[in-house]
Amino acid sequence: MIDIFKELSDYNKYFESQLALSGTILGLIIATSTFILQSGFASFQYSRSMFIKYYVHQSKFIFLSLAYNILFSLIVLYLSISSTTLFSFHIIFALIFSKYFLDFYSHKGYIETIHSTKYNPYKNGILKYFRYIENLGYIQNIIIYATLYIIFFYPLHFNYAFKLNEHQVFMTTVSCLAFSTLVVIRIIPQFFTFSEQEYKSKTKNEVIDNIEVDLSKENEILKDVLVKNGRNELLEQIETENFDSLFINMPNNKKEAFFVINIEISDKNIYEIIKEIENYSYEFLIEISNIHIDTNSFVLSYFIKIKNDTKTRNYFIRTNRNEIDELRKKNNKPKDFINNISNKLIDELFRNI
């Protein structure tokens, strides 16, 4: 056993001190997080939502680790419950903490990915989630999973299965306190690191007259993330399983993300063409709505060339992040999702199909 976890002669005294100390640190975390989330990113010109979400994820697992210390100290001091019940509470805390902890590092990996030459080739949400963590590097990954093991699962080796005693709670609270203290120490330096990162991302000749969000820069970030996610149609004309030719142009736009989508299709009837456009639009809109930037309005403007048709057909969709979030809760089929978008302009060839 690690020396720091050696048995104590008076656990009550320790848990009383732990209760007071964890409460103090929790208050400090709340004050710091409130400042950062409310006004700390006011000077950021773009990607504020991405960095704010970083601190939201971080606050969740810090609050939970300190809540563990406070609640389990209270249980040991003032309640008499079985070791099996205590074990169950411990496992619930461990699983929730692990989820919040990995959410944080997945988002951190996301930030690392879009500010580097790394990429994420996966479309599946779970694979994409863990690929962002992997992009942080092998050493960081070892630290992440070792931290989870040491804090919540290492103490379980020192008792019978499915039981937890006060010494194991002591071991966990020591780890949580040390972990929380390290995170608190790093919060402010991390903020200045992000400030520097945001500053370096600006063009050299850029002059800032105010602190309004620059959506043209946001759109550059959006395009970069989509390319790193495997959307090569933003770089060059490609052939896919569903389209003979696919190319997307993103003109400069300071108000919204505007995608001009050029498609060529042959050997498909009108019903199949509509289905492919609905499927592509659904996947594309869900993907861009999951990218953490400050752009909230999106336009998909299709120019569709069909074999043996002399006219170029149009299919226009304008939506926003709120509408996408609401529709995805109610519609899990692409056709229903697209049909319920309020702002569409569809070529007469595709109407009422």
Image (cartoon, helix red, strand yellow):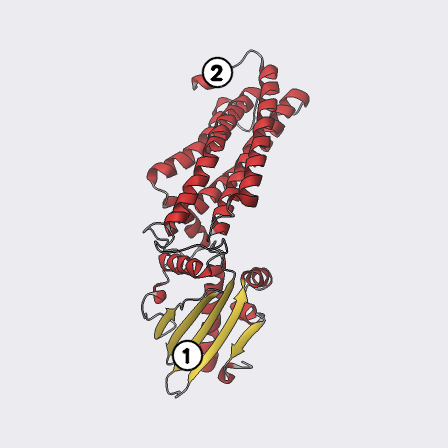
Figure quadrant of residue 92: top right
Q: Is residue 203 left or right of residue 170?
A: left
Coordinates of residue 278 in the picture (x, y in percent): 49, 71
Characterize the local packing of mark 2: few (<14), some (14-19) or many (20 or more) Cα atoms within 10 angstroms. few
Q: Residue at x 54, y 67 (%)?
A: 319
Tag shown at residue 6: 2
> Distance from label 1 to label 2 (Cα)?
71 Å
Which mark lies nearer to you, 1 or 2? 1
Residue under pointer 1 = 304
Q: Earlier along the polypeptide chain: callout 1 or callout 2?
A: 2
Numbered label tally: 2
Of residues 144 and 126, the one nearer the viewer is 144
Q: Residue at x 36, y 72 (%)?
A: 246
Residue 153 visible to the viewer:
no
Quick one: which residue is furthest to the top in this view? 9
Coordinates of residue 22 in the picture (x, y in percent): 58, 26
Q: Is residue 30 above or below residue 202?
A: above
Q: Is residue 292 above or below residue 94?
A: below
Coordinates of residue 339 in the picture (x, y in percent): 56, 72
Q: Amino acid at mark 2?
A: Lys
**Which element is circle 2 on?**
loop
Q: Residue at x 36, y 60 (%)?
A: 227
